[in-house]
Image (cartoon, rainbow, N blue to C red):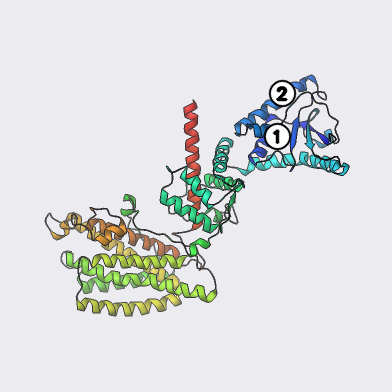
Amino acid sequence: QANHISSTHITKRSQYDITMIIGTTLRQGRFLVSKRPAILIGSVNSISSSGSSATESFSTALLRCIQQQGRSSSAAMSNVLVTNNLTTNASYRRTAASSRYQPSITQTIHHSYHTSTPALQSEAANAAAHEVDSLDAETTRTRTLYQALSPSIRSAIITDLRSVDADNNGKIDAEELRVLLGKHNDAFTESEILELSELFYTSLGACGVDINRFVEALDAAASDRGTSGGGETSEGEISPLAVKGKFKTHPLGIGTCASEYMYTKTHGGYSEDDLNIELTHVSPVSFSDKTALFAVRCVRLVFDTATLWNVGSVTKDKILNRAIFLETIAAIPGMVAAIIRHFRSLRNMARDGGMLNMFLEEANNERMHLLTFIRMKEPGYLFRAAVIGAQFGFGSFFLTAYMINPTWCHRFIGYIEEEACHTYTKILDEMDKAPAGSELAQWKIDGAPKIAKGYWHLGEHGTIYDVMRAIRADEAEHRDVNHAVSGVPDDTINPLYDPRVKLDRMLKTYVNDIMEKEASKQVGVV
């Protein structure tokens, strides 16, 4: 039946408002805010001659908006009809007193219902009137929703996201994310794509993310300027979007449960900047910090005196004896911290935040230092006996201390690692200034042990000098991590593997790649 038309007059708005409204609703995958199909119709019989040109301008603005959003296909156009030859009767009219718009110029919105039931016709009229009142709020929300992404960038992103939405459900799941990042393989490596898609899957509990929400998260990542008051967030800064005051939860809706069982730390990706570490020092503030620093200096003084480290020249045997002994002790704190946190997680039936995984990896990293050095020298029986005694003494002390005051222990280890950085820097300096033909100079050309080449990815021609630089970089990371976690709450997320931080960086990299490609297109057009 043809008895299905209910209409309402809407006063004319500025072309900007109309464009914003149509652009918003098209980007959201629907037309206007009604759940039913809508037809925009321009009525010339109820406007003056000056209004005719206004209607033409509205039509032009509408078509331009559709074209800008990339929705000018036949499917999109079949939902929109703009005509200047239809006269309709108004069921509802906003009065001049209640409207911000010009009452002399009107546009008409018609809702089509495939029914002749009077009750549904009345519902249609009420919905149309409500729609009119909702347009202002919808437009205002859209203007303030996005802070960094322009309409053209958002359009390009939505087109990109929809192209990988295989099941057409308006959501992006882990497999679709893998395909999406694969399209941008100049910005993401294959290993990064696999890791990020797996992290996306686990952090969302195998669910997908609505495309609109994904775009909002991209905008949040693009508009973020870090926590220090300017500039982009640095690579090492721990600042997920969820803890910056913008969101109570992460904009993607991701959680942190993946940090409990996912940790893929490797030591084979050091850059030249990573290897050229800075010799930093954290000044003690509290009494606990001062006692930790005092204890470290006392231990260093005793050990240097016992091994004659500062007496005479630095030799190959001195370096290896010192390194092997210290690495057998250095692997204890990480294991103790992991064990204590493991038992506490079991006892409290609560998450650990992935910290125990980080400390386990730290302990294993120190063990790898030891396994590398023993390929260069085989310790004797007396040396091994000294190691057993030191492990028993230091292990018992540190276990007791960590159960009492883990804050002090992490500060203590932070200062220990500061001294380790100084030690390896001195070794490298001695190798650099060693005369040609000496045993230390020979280390600069001698090949590294096979286990070291594989662990640090030193390459076929990696040398012992390269090993020393890589170990120093490891110690610098342990220094920074232990200082950072000293005194933090028990539920702190692993600072080296926070799912939110990793996915935030993914969002930033992706949106930057989109912006660069769109900019290059504009340059090509010009």
**Where is the N terminus found, in terms of image quarters?**
top right
304 left or right of 414 in image: left
Q: Quadrant of residue 27?
A: top right
Q: Which mark is residue 79?
A: 1
How many marks the image carries: the answer is 2
Q: Residue furthest right?
A: 118
Residue 374 visible at all: yes
Instruction: Classify 170 as above or below 60.
Output: below
Instruction: Classify 95 as above or below 398.
Output: above
| Label 1 environment density (alpha carbons within 10 Å; few <14, some 14–19, many ≥20) | few
Which residue type does callout 2 highlight? Glu
Q: Quadrant of residue 441?
A: bottom left
Q: What residue would you read off at disc 2?
A: 56
**Disc 1 element:** loop
289 left or right of 157 in image: left
Residues at discs 1 and 2 in contact (Cβ within 8 Å): no
**Disc 2 element:** helix
